[in-house]
Image: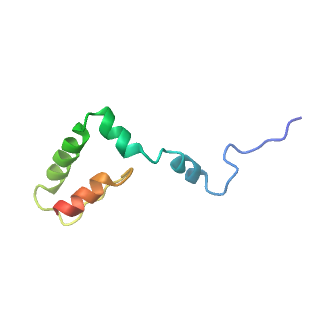
Amino acid sequence: MPEHRPVFPTKKPLHRIFTAIPGRYDLINHVITLGMDTGWRKQAALACLEGRPGRILDLCCGTGDLSLLLAKLA
């Protein structure tokens, strides 16, 4: 009978998933969208900042582009 091995043999199963994302994700995103992602991100940031909220939580922030833009514009 074969030995059962966990799918993620590390103590940090999510670490492997997120470190497998290519380091050039932002560049690829910019190329694929022909740079339009930058405009979309700015529109999203401005919409989040309407009403001058005291705090904003960016869940699933990915590479942090939106979070950084929010901090800069706030």
Q: Quadrant of residue 51?
A: bottom left
Number of callouts: 0
Where's the C terminus, which quadrant? bottom left
Q: Is residue 13 above or below residue 33?
A: below
| Residue at 31% from the left image edge and 55% from the top image edge | 58
Residue name at image x 30 percent, y 59 percent: 57
Say which of 33 and 14 sits in front: 33
Indicate how the structure is coloured in the image: rainbow
In terms of image quadrants, where is residue 24? top left
Query: Residue 29: x and y, percent?
Result: 34, 39
Tell me what residue is drawn at x 61 percent, y 56 percent.
12
In the picture as drawn, the residue positioned furthest to the bottom comes out as 54
Residue 49 vs 26, above or below: the answer is: below
Q: Nearer the viewer, residue 54 or 73?
A: 73
Instruction: Answer left or right for 24 relative to 19.
Output: left
User: Residue 13, how many percent across, how many down?
Assistant: 61, 51
Q: Furthest-left residue in view? A: 51
Q: Position of residue 68 (x, y in %)?
A: 28, 59
The residue furthest right is 1
Indicate the position of residue 14 as horizontal and vertical percent values.
56, 51
Q: Is residue 17 left or right of residue 47?
A: right
Relative side of 6 to 3, left or right: left
The residue closer to the viewer here, 32 or 51, is 32
Q: Quadrant of the N terminus?
A: top right
State the residue at coordinates (72%, 45%).
6
